[in-house]
Amino acid sequence: MAILPIIVAPDPRLKLTCAPVPKVDAAVARLMDDMLESMYAAPGIGLAAPQVGVLKRVIVIDTAKPAEEPRPIRLANPELVATSEELKSWDEGCLSLPEHYAEVVRPSRVAVRYLDEHNRKQEVEADSVLAVCLQHEMDHLDGILFVDHVSALKRNMILRKLRKAKKLGTLAAE
Ligand code: GNR
Ligand code: NI
């Protein structure tokens, strides 16, 4: 396994639409494992392939608390098959927007169809933090960051600070 560096915004690679994988083969399964290792190391509760520079529709998630047993989920080609009418606001963070947080409103429950690490079709129904994380990660596959769901004022403030931190080399990960 390998820890892959995580791309920080603003970066054109975070704004692209990712391609579906034709099938989950050994290379995609290895990518999923590397992404999980990178996510745990960060630490984070989710990671999308474009955040490590791979433009494929692959995400990993583990919303287990530190004291709980790990519950990794590996998803390729995830698709939203249902969303609740009910919305919920959540204070979101992102490994590509380090140290910045904002309230984002999304459907409170979702159902997602995907291919697992064995190329088998699966479906997951989620609420709470898992529903938030699934939507956050699927957004990444279409070049969307949580700041794209908040006001332009807040978005530009966060992106301006990150641009400056990159220039000065003051990001925590660097
Ligand atoms: O680690 C993460 N925490 C988080 C918290 C609230 C809402 C979404 C997330 S996802 C984030 C990891 C990440 O950037 N995934 O793309
Ligand atoms: Ni993110």
Image (cartoon, rainbow, N blue to C red):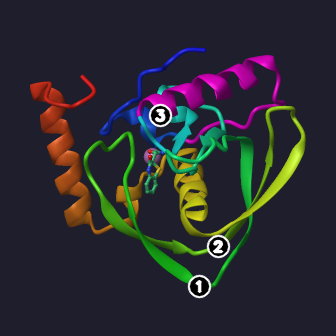
State the mark number for residue 1: none
Which tag, 2 or 1, sits closer to the chain's start?
Answer: 1
**Mark 3 is on which residue type?**
Gln
Q: Position of residue 146 (x, y in %)?
A: 40, 57
Q: Which residues lie in the magenta part?
A: 17-42
Q: Residue furthest front?
A: 67
- Label 1: which secondary element: loop
Q: Position of residue 86 (x, y in %)?
A: 59, 85
Q: Residue furthest left?
A: 168
Q: Which residue is mark 3?
A: 51
Residue at position x 13%, y 29% in the image? 170
Q: For this view, does 25 lie left or right of residue 80?
A: right
Q: For this view, does 48 lie left or right of residue 105?
A: right
- Disc 2 to disc 3, C-alpha distance: 25 Å
* Residue 20 lies within the magenta run: yes
Residue at position x 61%, y 55% in the image? 134
Q: Position of residue 93 (x, y in %)?
A: 37, 53
State the mark number for residue 86: 1
Q: Which residue is mark 2?
A: 109
